[in-house]
Image: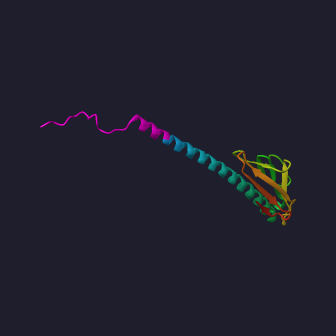
Amino acid sequence: MKSPSILPHSNQAGITYFEVIMVIALLTAITSLTLIIGTSSFRGYQFRTSREVLRSVLVTARQNSLSNIAESKHGVRLEANQITLFRFPYTTGTSTNQVFAFEGGVRLAGITFPYDVVFTQLSADTTAVNFTITNDHGKTGTISISSEGAISW
């Protein structure tokens, strides 16, 4: 009777270098595709977040004017890459100003900067305006403010 050999037999199946290289190439391709999709999703998220912050700041200024907070008009200063919520009249550096910067290449277009949207006390009337929010990757959206202060996007 032959005793079992402790050395592997040369005819046993195993993983070849070619198979290892193919698995690494497949994993690399999957990872690359995931990064491309993830980056695109993140850019869309930045754009939607900036648009929502802009809408929220405009609504806040409108509500503050309707509520006659501090017995003053309230407004939003629109600049290419940031917006400022302020109590009328706008003064740079005032402690009541709240500045919100856009990130990820998001910016405003379609108006001359700086542009102030000021809502009248108790009625929220303002000058009608349309402008565009855009980013470096082709996403755009239009925001309209009617003379009665209605905000649509």
Left/right of residue 136 with respect to residue 73 in the rendered view: left
Left/right of residue 91 with respect to residue 23 in the rendered view: right
Does residue 101 show up magenta in the picture?
Answer: no
Q: Residue at x 63, y 48 (%)?
A: 40
Q: Position of residue 55 (x, y in %)?
A: 74, 58
Q: How many marks?
A: 0
As rendered, which of 126 and 91 lies closer to the eye?
126
Q: Outermost residue toward the right?
A: 127
Q: Residue at x 77, y 62 (%)?
A: 152
Q: Residue at x 69, y 54 (%)?
A: 48
Quadrant in which residue 136 is drawn = top right
> Can you say whether 136 is above or below 141 in the image?
above
Q: Position of residue 16 (x, y in %)?
A: 38, 36
Q: Position of residue 5 (x, y in %)?
A: 20, 34
As rendered, which of 147 and 17 lies closer to the eye?
17
Left/right of residue 74 with respect to residue 20 in the rendered view: right
Left/right of residue 89 with respect to residue 101 in the rendered view: right
The quarter of the rendered structure image containing the C terminus is bottom right
Q: State whether the magenta stretch is mostly helix, strand or loop.
A: loop
First to last magenta residue range: 1-25
As rendered, which of 32 and 92 lies closer to the eye?
32
Does residue 6 show up magenta in the picture?
Answer: yes
The quarter of the rendered structure image containing the N terminus is top left
Q: Position of residue 36 (x, y in %)?
A: 60, 45
